[in-house]
Amino acid sequence: MAAENPDATFRSLGIVDVLCEACDRLKWEKPTKIQREALPIALEGKDVIGLAETGSGKTGAFALPILQALLETPRRLFALILTPTRELAFQISEQFEALGSGIGVSCAVVVGGMDMVSQALMLAKKPHVLIATPGRLVDHLENTKGFNLRSLKYLVMDEADRILNMDFEVEVNKILKIVPKDRRTYLFSATMTKKVQKLQRASLREPVRVEVSTKYQTVEKLQQFYIFIPAKHKDCYLVSVLNELAGSSVMVFCGTCNNTQRVALMLRNLGFSAIPLHGQMSQLKRLGALNKFKAKGQNILVATDVASRGLDIPHVDVVLNFDIPTHSKDYIHRVGRTARAGRAGKSITFVTQYDVELFQRIEQLIGKRLPKFPTTEEEVMALAERVAEAQRYAKMEITDSEESRKRPPPGRFDNDKVEVSETNAKPIGNKRKRKKK
């Protein structure tokens, strides 16, 4: 069976030459385990449930059979891919366009936070592949004239567990009622939760289950460490570790949007090329930050868990858990940003006196005890003064930006408002007096 053959090629799995050439251009030398298992089943025309860890090559496992089917029967609005986040939607679109470059495939991305009208114009052109977040897709189905999914032949739900965790259940049910019954459905998920099982029963017909990893695990080539530190010195330790990792590309994970912004500003004030990525940024800024990091324009990406799943950033050397994740499973997703596609990588988790229980849960989940990352307290504390100054500047910048957001637009002063209201008041008063006469 092809799935059991680690030497299988895309060609031996049944992928046509034009798509094999696209895989070569993307430097996909061999199919990953999930691709070896899922591709033959998908090419037979069966529904697939794929359970695989992050960074396992899931996009290729559903994109290649869809593009091959599109080659055989070209038609518009052929496939719909539902995904939980905007960034993941754009990334899937990039992979479809790269794989389908030789066959002229057209894609459209429909996500929240962007202009509905320009999206409606894209939909009017009837792309072959539509990648969407559930909420915005339902908006278009209800409000965009002439848009429907009647010609759809393929439905993919990627990161299904996360789609449902983000409370898109109502929207997904609406979409399932609208899409044609005569279609192929692929459901990919990192975990098989009760909600995902329910979704599977509602949307798939006699699916074949493909399971790459049955338990939560991190890849073998990932070196994992922890540092036990007092909470008040976290920033000093971060700067010390980043100095030691100079030249590496690093993802620093924080627990909140505010802390992400603060840490990025503090690091910039210390001369690091750091860039933030969090949910309170506009969609264009988020994509800009991601592209700068991908293009190695900035080598430190400070992010919330918005960047912990799905995003394919090939060159991350180190993942730093600055704030320990509250859900142990998020640790797996975060550290999965490095050591991808067979490369080596490193993760370091900061553990304060308040995080011990959370850290023990993580060790229990991954089934291993993590070693300490070597640090010298004297060297770390020598940075305290410079770090304190950078913290002050970061705080001032955040305060300034918050105040500028509250300020009225230029040219509108309180005096102007008083004058305007007084001039408006006079004729109204005069009219009332005239009425009394």
Image: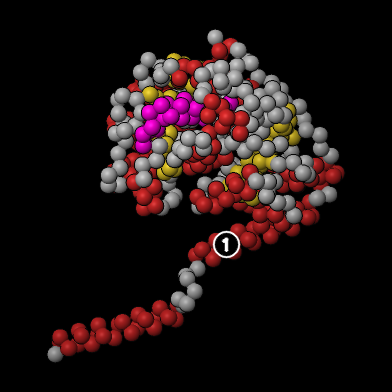
Amino acid type of disc 1? Ser
Q: Quadrant of residue 10?
A: top right
The magenta stretch is 54-79
Residue at 60% of width from left, 33% of height from top? 26
Residue at 42% of width from left, 81% of height from top? 416
Circle 1 is placed at which residue position?
A: 401
Q: Quadrant of residue 178?
A: top left
Residue 185 visible? The answer is: yes
Image coordinates for residue 113, horizontal then vertical, percent: 44, 50
Image coordinates for residue 24, horizontal then vertical, percent: 61, 30
Instruction: Examine the structure image and report whether residue 231 is included in the region drawn in magenta.
Output: no
Of 414 and 104, which appears nearest the observer? 104
Quarter of the picture holding the C terminus: bottom left
* Image position of 106 (left or right of 262): left
Helix or strand or loop: what does disc 1 sit on? helix
Residue 139 visible? The answer is: no
